Image (cartoon, grey):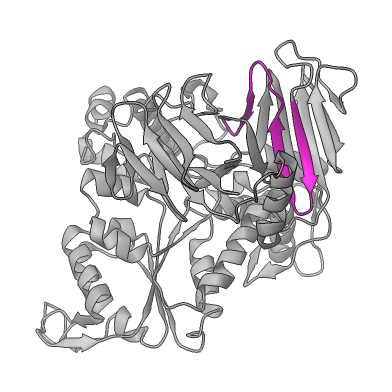
Amino acid sequence: MAELIFFRRGEELMRVLLDQHSMVIGRGASADIAIPHPEVSRRQALVERRDGRFVAIDLSGRGLRTASGTVDETPLSEGSELWLGDYRALFREAAGPTHGETRNDLVGEFTRDVGASRKLDEPVLLRVRSGGTERTVPLEGEVVVGKDPGCAVVLDDAFASGVHCRIVRDGGRILLHDLGSTNGTWVNGIRVGHAELTPGAWLRLGETEIGVEVAKGKEPAAFEGIVSEAACMREVFDLIERVAPSAAPVAIFGETGTGKELVASAIHARSERSKGPFIPVNCAAISRELIESELFGHEKGAFTGATNARKGAFEEASGGTIFLDEIGELSADLQAKLLRTLELGEIKRVGSSRPFRVDARVVAATHRDLRAMVRQGTFREDLYYRLAVIRVELPPLRRRPGDVGVLAERFAKAHAPRGAPPLLTPEALTRLEAHSWPGNVRELKNVLARALLLRRGPTIGPADLSFDVAGEHATSESVLAEDEDTYVALPGKTLSQIEMEATLKALRRHKGNRRAAARELDLARSTIQTRAKELGVPPPSSDPDD
């Protein structure tokens, strides 16, 4: 059976089984799949089976956004994508059922067909939050949720139906079925009828929230130095295993601090080029004047200070892998030269007209939305498709259930004085797990290192933990969305921290507009631009050059 996988900002939200002849996608409550986004019409699209294949049909009158442009109708095949506001729907095919199979047969067949690639062996827990209380229920077999006393999970919720939904543990998969509820079942903000759930997903039924978690077991083994017990990261590891032997370019997408270079290094280590060099280049850390020389090399006398000829990163990576971090920071002229290298397999050093053949696999990474940059005209579309032959999307730490505690304990042991590893108190772990981690794993590591230095005793307690302003606002995508009143002042702030806080609040009030924030604070626009870049605040979409 086929499925639609929904993503937002690179994060997988849910999977919807296409087990009906047709499904309506839209913003309205009557839609089979409800997308809560203002750019999505109440009835945006119809996905239906026609002559044994699925097609997507526009219902909005504005067309459907696809990889090939805006269309009124498009057939869906393996890998087809639809864009719905901030959401991306990826179509996946699976073996179709034979005539006469029931819905339960379909779900079982779907599980047998594709469940092995993402088999979940660990115990699964449902964390139920309702009416100010919280409880944990093990998921074994089938659980029916609703207000009726006969349900396995009984809800005290006026907005939930008597028999609201069914959650099934079938082999290695977790399947959700809405049972005709009045107010619907929502997964990560999207209303669904039937969906596959993964650990980390949150369901909403009326005013009740249900989280899906993996029960904690032994500490997970590291995958090429990357430690995680989250199912979403195991999917990343599986993808690395499958794409590493290929020579195709890979693009890694993820927030700051999610470990993009570790993933690039893992791809290299598992590839046939593992005995060759791995050359990382941070495109954001090198000045525009020097980046071309850094990538492609230069000849003697090519510019002031070029006293000798020098190989660039592409030549140094010959026979191995070049990792281009923060690829979204490249200027337009460097994008054109990089595209030429990818297309022809050759480079020209600065100051030379002679081409040099290069043989390096390209792995790129960015925390930016390159598709949005393509639409804005700040990133070349042809280069994007050359780089993103294979996409690897890294989930942020807040979407990795159980990893905060595991990583915190590992970091505390790794950085502690020899022979005296401190223990994290349960209260400290609770505070760490409650933090949103905008700086991801890098921020967690810094917080633990600081706690080791500042701790008041043999253990690390909640009072030993502090979260700095820069780390608190390291995430570019979400920083403006936070409510201004949620900021909690930290004692002992430096003047620089206070200035950054004032700048952040002004940028929030003016939705990222640098000019307006500069006028309010009576500062030079260039000062605001510098601070905004440090804070990771994106410019307004209407004026990307602001």
**Callout count:** 0
Compared across the picture, whether 111 is left or right of 502 comes to right
Is residue 183 within the magenta segment? yes
Residue 137 lies, in percent from the top left, at: 85, 35
Q: Nearer the viewer, residue 144 or 202?
A: 144
In this view, the residue farthest toward the right is 150
Q: Name which residue lies at 44% across and 85% down.
A: 277
- Range drawn in magenta: 165-189
**Residue 165 visible somewhere in the drawing:** yes
Q: Residue furthest front?
A: 99
Looking at the rendered image, the quarter that the C terminus falls into is: top left
Residue 448 drawn in magenta: no
Q: Position of residue 77 (x, y in %)?
A: 44, 53
In the displayed structure, 168 sits above or below 407; it is above
Residue under the image location 34 percent in, 26 percent down: 60
Left or right: 244 as drawn, with respect to 187? left
Question: Which residue is at 55% across, 79% downward?
Answer: 269
Q: Which of the 4 image quarters holds residue 385? A: bottom left
For the point 23% across and 82% down, which residue is it?
346
Up-down relation of residue 422 to residue 99 (above or below): below
Q: Main secondary structure of the magenta part?
A: strand
In the rendered image, residue 307, in percent from the top left (x then y), is placed at: 16, 87
Residue 186, image quadrant? top right
405 and 201: which one is in front?
201
Q: Is residue 520 left or right of residue 421?
A: left
Tell me where residue 318 appears, x and y as whole percent.
Answer: 36, 87
Residue nearest the observer in this picture, 351 or 287: 351
Q: Is residue 462 visible?
A: no
